[in-house]
Image (tube, rainbow, N blue to C red):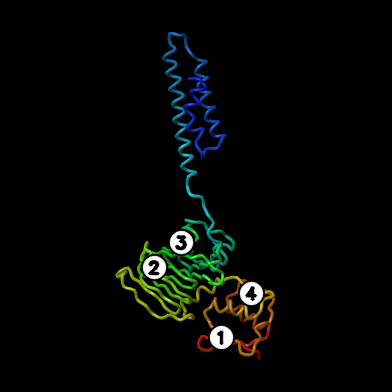
């Protein structure tokens, strides 16, 4: 078995597209070394045929082991690469997660005692309550195995769509804020802003749609029956999301800009009575809930804050 024969036998490995050059060359050199070692130990002509068979057997066995290793290497590296889907932008209640920590595709996220806020590259924000389990397949698909998530797709930022999948139905939105609450026995979808469509699992056909102020409910006992009820934008079920608000840098922004952020974060309508919306703010409200941030700003710029039937009234003393 000469060099030409070895090269011919190894050509499929040498030409394999996903195998690095150094690995291909090492394979060739290893078998050639085995062949030359066997050649140096050849017996006289009377025993050459058995020895030659031994040489071919040695080369073949090395080739088989090497080829198996190459197949394993190709299989291992053929796995889909990890893609970063989102970044943690807020954590409350547990030190197991950290701000700016990446979230990858197919990563199982068990929130435990934590409330998380995760921002996708598109700007879309997903917040997850404690005791929730979810997995992003990619930037457009999320599976909720249990728990509660709040999806905030601000239409002004042209976020990508997101399909939230559960065993009882899939939820598609159009520029909205909505809450999905799923415990494997029942599914509730509450809409605070915009419109959502509830679909059968793995189907595109819409079973029902819901607009702001509506909730759709489905149970595992009767998955074809959809119950529709009303839900207020200030209902207690929304309160947990305020522990991980979307960040806002108030330094240099107007009071009006801050209050627009406050409305989206809390669902409370704000009315400015005799206060100037163009007042410029400074400082930071990082780490504060929206209500605490409003209270701090009210003190700083000397405003009175009062509440009436879910409405927040802002005025100068």
Label 2 crowding class (10 Å Cα cut-off): few <14, some 14-19, many 20+? some
Q: Which residue is pictured at 44% across the width and 64% down the height? A: 163
N-term-proximal mark, 2 vs 1: 2
Label 1 crowding class (10 Å Cα cut-off): few <14, some 14-19, many 20+? some
**Cα separation between marks 4 and 3:** 32 Å
**Cα separation between marks 2 and 1:** 34 Å
Which secondary structure lies at badge 4? Answer: loop
Marks 2 and 1 close (CB-CB < 8 Å) = no
Residue beneath disc 2: 183
N-term-proximal mark, 2 vs 4: 2
Residue beneath disc 4: 285
Q: Is residue 43 above or below residue 274?
A: above
Which secondary structure lies at badge 1? Answer: strand
| Discs 3/2, front | 3
**Cα separation between marks 2 and 4:** 34 Å
Q: Which residue is pictured at 55% across the width and 31% down the height? A: 25
| Discs 4/3, front | 3
Q: Is residue 158 above or below residue 272?
A: above
Residue beneath disc 3: 141
N-term-proximal mark, 3 vs 2: 3
| Discs 2/1, front | 1
Residue 255, quarter of the rendered image: bottom right
Query: Where residue 259 sits: x, y (%)?
Result: 60, 80
| Discs 1/3, front | 3
**Cα separation between marks 1 and 4:** 19 Å
8 or 264: which is nearer to us? 8
Which secondary structure lies at badge 2? Answer: loop
Marks 2 and 4 close (CB-CB < 8 Å) = no
Query: Where residue 125 sits: x, y (%)?
Result: 53, 67
Residue beneath disc 1: 312
Q: Is residue 159 above or below residue 61?
A: below
N-term-proximal mark, 1 vs 4: 4
């Amino acid at each position: 078995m000469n060099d030409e024969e070895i090269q011919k036998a190894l050509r499929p490995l040498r030409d394999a597209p996903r195998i690095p050059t150094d690995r291909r060359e090492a394979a060739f050199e290893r078998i050639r070394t085995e062949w030359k070692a066997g050649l140096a130990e050849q017996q006289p002509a009377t025993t050459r045929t058995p020895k030659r068979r031994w040489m071919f057997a040695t080369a073949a066995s090395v080739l088989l082991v090497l080829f198996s290793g190459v197949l394993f290497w190709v299989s291992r590296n053929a796995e889909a690469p990890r893609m970063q889907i989102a970044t943690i932008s807020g954590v409350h209640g547990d030190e197991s997660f950290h701000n700016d920590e990446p979230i990858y595709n197919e990563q199982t996220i068990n929130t435990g005692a934590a409330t998380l806020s995760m921002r996708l590259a598109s700007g879309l924000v997903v917040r997850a309550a404690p005791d929730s389990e979810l997995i992003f397949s990619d930037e457009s698909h999320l599976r909720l195995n249990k728990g509660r998530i709040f999806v905030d797709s601000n239409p002004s930022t042209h976020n990508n769509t997101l399909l939230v999948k559960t065993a009882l139905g899939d939820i598609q939105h159009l520029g909205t804020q909505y809450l999905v609450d799923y415990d494997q026995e029942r599914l509730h979808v509450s809409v605070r802003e915009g419109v959502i469509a509830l679909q059968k699992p793995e189907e595109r056909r819409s079973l029902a749609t819901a607009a702001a102020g509506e909730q759709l409910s489905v149970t595992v006992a009767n998955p074809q029956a959809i119950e529709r009820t009303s839900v207020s934008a200030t209902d207690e079920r929304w309160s947990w999301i305020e522990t991980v608000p979307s960040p806002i840098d108030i330094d240099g922004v107007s009071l009006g800009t801050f209050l627009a952020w406050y409305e989206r974060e809390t669902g409370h309508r704000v009315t400015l009575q005799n206060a100037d919306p163009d007042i410029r703010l400074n400082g930071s409200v990082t780490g504060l809930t929206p209500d605490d941030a409003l209270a701090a700003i009210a003190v700083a710029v000397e405003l009175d804050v009062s509440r009436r039937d879910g409405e927040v009234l802002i005025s100068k003393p």
